[in-house]
Image: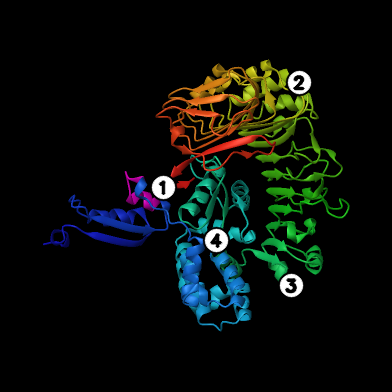
Amino acid sequence: MTWVQLFRRYLIVIDDLWSIEAWKTIECALVKNNNGSRVITTTRMHEVAKACCTGFPEHVYHMEPFSDLHSRWLFFKRVFGTEDSCPEESREISADMLRKCKGVPLAIISIASLLAIKTRHVDPWKKIFKSLGSELDTNPNLNWMRHVLSLSYNDLDHELKTCLLYLASYPEDYKIERSDLLKKWIAEGFIRERRGLELEEAAESRFNELINRSMIEPVYRYSDDVVSHCRVHDLMLDLIVSKCREENFVTIIDGQFISMNEASQARRISHQSGNRDIAQAVERMRGPHVRSYNSFPAADCIPPLSKFEHLRILDMMGRRSGTDPENMCVDLSAINELFLLRYLKISHFHLKLPNKFGELKHLMTLDIWHAHLYPRNQSSDFTSLSSLRDLSLPCDYGVVLMRNGLSKLCSLRRLWGFDLQDNSVECIRDLGELTNLTQLALHYSCPSHEEILVASLEKLGNSNLRRLSWYSEGETLSTQFWGNCFTHPRHLQRFFAHGSMPKIPKWMEHAESLAYLDRLRVEELKSDDLQVLAHLPCLVSLFLSATTVLEKHIIIHPNTFPSLKYFVFFCEPSSLMTFEKDAMPQLQDLTIHFSNYKQGSAVETQEGSPVAGLRAPCKPWKDLLGYPCQTWSKVQSGVCM
């Protein structure tokens, strides 16, 4: 008689499951006898959780961090017995400790257990807080936490370990931009080519695996299911920094003195903060082995770039406030000496460009989007950068005049900040030859060269263009322009329009991959125009505004906008909007900007309309322009999402 026959109804808890294969082996031993048995598994892997609940995704429970209330209860219970027993002088440092733990029970218990055996004076606690990273290495009371964190680290393959260790380049609590991180991994050579995948796709796969393993925390954009940034939990970062010290992987300059010997051995430098002495030491530094240099605003210095002859990554971020251009200007005149450079990004520094980027044959990313050009308008030749995949030009702080021959950049995937007014007709014509381009941002201030631009955009729309951002000032482009710039842009997924157009262009109804329409502002809106967007199968997010609405009653018909989750609508004067049954079935968030209607009267819902299931949790508020607004949100388990 087997144990299953003996106990016809069973409850089994399987803790810390690591792989789908292990679950399949265990599952074979489980008899499905319809007696109401249950199996509970815990895992760090999102994919394992989904495999355990095949066919029942709603049974996956994602553990959220403890709330502040529960975190305090657990912490003070372990240290003092109750929160009321905590001395007043210990409350501030206790709050600092809890912020460090970020609601993770393992971290709270481990740190509280360490403090419980210490004297309850504030000074020793402050000392522990400041040295928590080294305590993780040496204090036996934190061995279990280090063991648990190390299990996750040791289970990674070599490539993924290398990708994870690179996160030590970022300061604590820093919100790391996903796209930048992936480009740096590629520039460092961490990502191997895989059959059927571009390098960016392979890097994306590795990034998603770290999220799946809960080793980094994803940060999502509003009205978007895509991870735009990530964070590393403080205690995981402590482990990563510890591993980096052991392997001389990343050298962190954070205000502590760094010896010239230590600097000379550094392979990757992360300059996170400093003072005048540190800045002077960095300026004298020679880095024969330095492959990567990342500096952050608090560093406030410019390193001797010419001494880092083997540099592959240079990312310098200055202070956002205005600085003296003479003293804080990054001069790239000698940048061609860094012939191994693959990634170059300068932000919030004054910047002087070289006349020509001649020798940087390996450069893949050049990002000066947030740089302040000094002088303001500069000309530079990028045409010899045969490996360049990402070029981002200044948006608000000057104009880069590109030389003719833009079509030579045949590897370019992303061109951001191209100014249509100041660049030549030849450059605008060459845009259409960049058939590998997937992302394009254009600046446009007055009508000129419309026919040439239309021809270029149509070529890109028929090629690989997936994202178009349009920054327009001044006059509105003609209906003819917007009607002809695309015919069937089958790959276009995102369209951002900072500026207005006469009406919704007809070609949008053929953009079957279009998922995000942001800041779509039309001078005139008719119900028929809205139908252009109503049957797009992939449209998830729509921000639509209209200067004039010809019908005072807008009706959203049944079975329209099948995938739309986020809808923002603005018009002046306001119109009544009616949602009929089964209109926008996936809608989660609705925001209506109105001026003439009282609360709740800008929207009318019929029985069976998904909008009727949304809740308006707050009174009308005013947007940045002072217009009244009302927001409706999806409600789950009594919580407004």
Q: Which mark is first along the chain, 3 or 2?
A: 3
Q: Which labelled disc corresponds to residue 259?
A: 3
Task: For mark 2, give the secondary structure.
Answer: loop
Vertical placement of residue 173 versus 391, above or below: below
Q: Position of residue 413 (x, y in %)?
A: 63, 36
Q: Amino acid at mark 3?
A: Ser
Residue that badge 2 annotates: 449
Residue 189: x and y, percent? 59, 52
Of label 2 and label 1, which has the lower sequence position?
2
Front position in the image: 386 or 525: 525
Under circle 3, the secondary element is loop
Q: At which x and y percent is residue 221? A: 57, 44
Could you classify mark 4 by the number of other residues whose Cα lies within 10 Å: few (under 14), some (14-19), or many (20 or more)?
Answer: some
Q: Earlier in the sequence, mark 3 or mark 1?
A: 3
Q: Are marks 1 and 4 in contact (CB under 8 Å)?
A: no
In the picture of the structure, the residue carrying the numbered disc 1 is 637
Q: Which residue is mark 4?
A: 233
- For the residues carrying marks 1 and 4, which lies nearer the camera in this image? 1
Q: Which residues are magenta?
A: 47-57
Q: Residues within 10 Å of mark 1 (few under 14, many from 20)?
A: few
